[in-house]
Image (tube, rainbow, N blue to C red):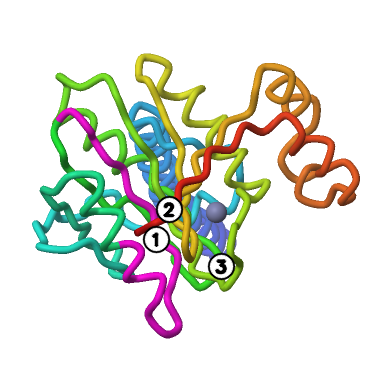
Amino acid sequence: MKKLALTLGLAGILYGNLNAQNSRQDSLNNKIDSLKALMSAINSNCVYLENPAEKFLPEYYSEKVYSENLCINTNEKKYYAAKKNEEEGIKDIHKINNEKNAYEEAWIYLPEKEEWYEIGINSDAISVQPFYFRIKNILEENKDISKIVFYHNHPGNEDIDFPSISDIHQSMKYNKILPDYKITNKIIAKQDVIEYSLNSAGKEKFAEKNILTWMYTSSEEREKLYEDLTIKCAKIN
Ligand SMILES: [Zn+2]
C-alpha cells in the first residue's frame, strides 16, 4: 500500500513537472512564432539587416510632423517634413551647420514635389543613419515621382568635406534597393554643397571589399578609391 502511494505520488510529481515543462515549451513556441512574424514583417518592409547592429532599430512607426524649417531631430518617434524648394532647404541645413554643437542629420528631397523629409536616426556630431523603413514609407506615399536627392550635413569645420566611406557605402546601397529612381547624393558642408558619385570603375572597386574592410583600409587604398569619385562642388551663398 505504501509502495502504491509512493508510486502514485511520484507519478503525480512527474505529471506536474511534465505539465510545467509543456507550458514552458508552449510559451517558448509562442515567442519563436512572434519572432518569426517580426522577422517576416521586417523583411517584407524592406528593412535590411546586413549589419547586426541594425537589428536595434527604434520602433518602426514614427509620426510625420510638418515643419516650417528643416531641423535636427533626435526623437525617433516622429519625423519632420517640409514643403520648400531645394535652395531654401539648403539654406536651412547651412544654418544648422553653423549652430554650436550641431549634429548630423539626413533628408530625402523630392524635386518633383519640392518636399523634404527627415530620414536620419541615431544622430550625433559625426554620423547619422538613414532609416530605410521611413524612406520606404515616404516613397510609398509619393508613388508618382522618379527623382530622389539624398542629403546629409557635415557640420565639421572643414572647408570642403569629402564623403566618408560610409557615405559611399550608403549611396551604393540606395542604388541597390531603389533601382527605379534617379538618385543623387549630396552633402552640405560648412560652405559647400557636394554632390558625389562613384564612376563605374569605382563601383567595381568598392564592391570588391565589404564595408568593414573599407572602414579600416589604409589611406592609400582610400585615396585610390577617391580617384574614381566624381565630385561636384557648389558654394553656398
Ligand atoms: Zn557623411
Which residue in the protein does label 1 denote?
Answer: 105
Which residue in the protein does label 3 denote?
Answer: 126
- Of residues 127 and 221, which is closer to you in this image? 221
- Residue drawn at (80%, 32%) of the image: 209
Q: Earlier in the sequence, mark 1 or mark 2?
A: 1
Q: Secondary structure at mark 3?
A: loop
Query: Is residue 49 placed above or below 43 in the rendered structure?
Result: below
Where residue 44 appears, x then y in whole percent? Answer: 35, 26
CB-based contact (under 8 Å), mark 3 and mark 1: no
Where residue 224 appears, x then y in whole percent? Answer: 84, 36
Q: Disc 2 marks which amino acid?
A: His
Residue range corresponding to the magenta coloring: 93-112
**Ligand 1 in which quarter:** bottom right
Mark 2 vs ligand 1: CB under 8 Å?
yes
Which residue in the protein does label 2 denote?
Answer: 152
Q: Earlier in the sequence, mark 3 or mark 1?
A: 1
CB-based contact (under 8 Å), mark 1 and mark 2: yes
Q: Residues within 10 Å of mark 1 (few under 14, many from 20)?
A: many
